[in-house]
Image: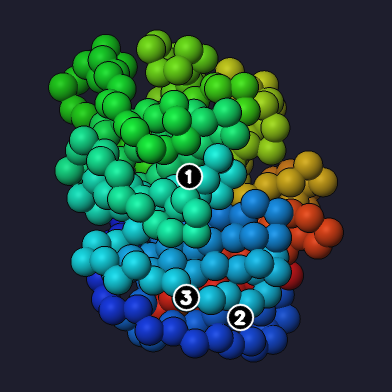
């Protein structure tokens, strides 16, 4: 059966109310905790500065590589599902097609032109930004997120069907290449600003996230324990054995061989580019979910994941 529903965690809504915390748990260190009905759906870093976003307009910010976090909630009736820190200005996207950008220290809503749920956004420092979401929603900005226009894809030609696939993640390189992923294990790339698309991968299940170490090396993760790796810019993909059938929701990797995969009741670590894996069972990992994982830059690298109960956890 085609997997058409979003992960159940994206349907959790609540009122954000959180406090800081730190609890040593071996491989995991709790850095922030909300209440039971809180949820965080994405996290990003630009060197030591980072953001995490979630339910009811929740925005957390850090200036010390994820060690401490401060709430700057927008108090919105909708969930924020994606955030980008690396473009000309921070951008967040979410339910109902909402898009906000941060300019001069203040968040400003901009018109997206869609009512579809937006689940991911990526931007480069030249001003190109792309947001993706439900039922093939695909938006492009060339001015750092201030204005947006829809991109058109001939989904019938791609899928040999009239379906409009959910798109779960997107990556924009500094060279302006756009790569997106979603249902049907789609991985697609455009080198001309979204005018034309090349299908790099397609199958039956869903891919929820991807991470590119450089222009050639990337990972993608998704439904039923799916982990894919490429070393040739996506021309070919190798399926890795991770010994789990849980849904994997995000991935981060580094050139030194480190890979971290977060998901539903699952946290996986590799130190050899995915050749072998450690399944982390500490804390609440085996009974809860963590939606997103990212790493700070600068003098010290900290890998953090965010998810249920508004938690931010450092992966040591």
Q: Residue at x 41, y 49 (%)?
A: 101
Q: Position of residue 302 (x, y in %)?
A: 72, 64
Of 190 and 15, nearer the camera is 15
Residue 279 relative to residue 123: left or right: right
Above or below residue 131? Residue 54 is below
The mark found on residue 296 in the picture is none
Residue 178 relative to residue 81: left or right: right
Q: Under tag 3, what secondary structure?
A: strand
Q: Under tag 1, what secondary structure?
A: strand
**Cα distance between the residues tagged 3 and 2:** 16 Å
Mark 2 is surrounded, within 10 Å at the Cα level, by few (under 14), some (14 to 19) or many (20 or more) other residues, namely many
Dot in front, 3 or 2? 3
The mark found on residue 71 in the picture is 3
Dot in front, 2 or 1? 2
Tag 3 or tag 1, which sits nearer the N-term? Answer: 3
Mark 3 is surrounded, within 10 Å at the Cα level, by few (under 14), some (14 to 19) or many (20 or more) other residues, namely some
Q: Position of residue 241 (x, y in %)?
A: 60, 46
Q: Residue furthest front?
A: 104
Which residue is disc 2 drawn over? 30
Q: Under tag 2, what secondary structure?
A: strand
Which residue is disc 1 drawn over? 209
């Amino acid at each position: 059966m085609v997997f058409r529903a979003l992960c159940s965690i994206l349907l959790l809504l609540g009122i954000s109310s959180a406090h800081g915390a730190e609890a040593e748990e071996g491989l995991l260190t709790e850095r922030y905790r909300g209440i039971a009905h809180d949820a965080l759906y994405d996290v990003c870093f630009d060197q030591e500065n980072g953001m995490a976003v979630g339910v009811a307009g929740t925005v957390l910010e850090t200036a010390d590589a994820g060690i401490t976090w401060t709430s700057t909630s927008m108090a919105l009736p909708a969930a924020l599902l994606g955030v980008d820190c690396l473009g000309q200005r921070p951008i967040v996207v979410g339910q109902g097609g909402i898009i906000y950008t941060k300019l001069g220290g203040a968040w400003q809503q901009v018109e997206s032109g869609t009512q579809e749920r937006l689940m991911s956004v990526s931007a480069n420092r030249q001003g190109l930004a792309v947001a993706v979401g439900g039922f093939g929603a695909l938006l492009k900005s060339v001015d750092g997120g201030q204005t947006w226009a829809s991109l058109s894809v001939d989904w019938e030609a791609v899928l040999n069907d009239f379906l409009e696939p959910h798109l779960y993640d997107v990556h924009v390189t500094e060279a302006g290449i756009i790569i997106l992923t979603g249902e049907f294990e789609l991985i697609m790339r455009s080198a001309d600003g979204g005018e034309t698309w090349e299908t790099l991968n397609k199958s039956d299940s869903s891919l929820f996230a991807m991470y590119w170490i450089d222009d050639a090396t990337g990972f993608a993760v998704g439904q039923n324990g799916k982990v894919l790796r490429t070393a040739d810019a996506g021309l070919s993909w190798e399926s890795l054995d991770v010994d789990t059938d849980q849904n994997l929701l995000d991935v981060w990797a580094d050139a030194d061989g480190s890979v971290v995969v977060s998901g539903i009741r699952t946290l996986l670590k590799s130190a050899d580019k995915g050749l072998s894996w450690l399944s982390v069972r500490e804390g609440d990992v085996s009974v809860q979910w963590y939606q997103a994982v990212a790493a700070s830059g600068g003098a010290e690298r900290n890998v953090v994941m965010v998810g249920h109960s508004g938690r931010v956890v450092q992966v040591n």
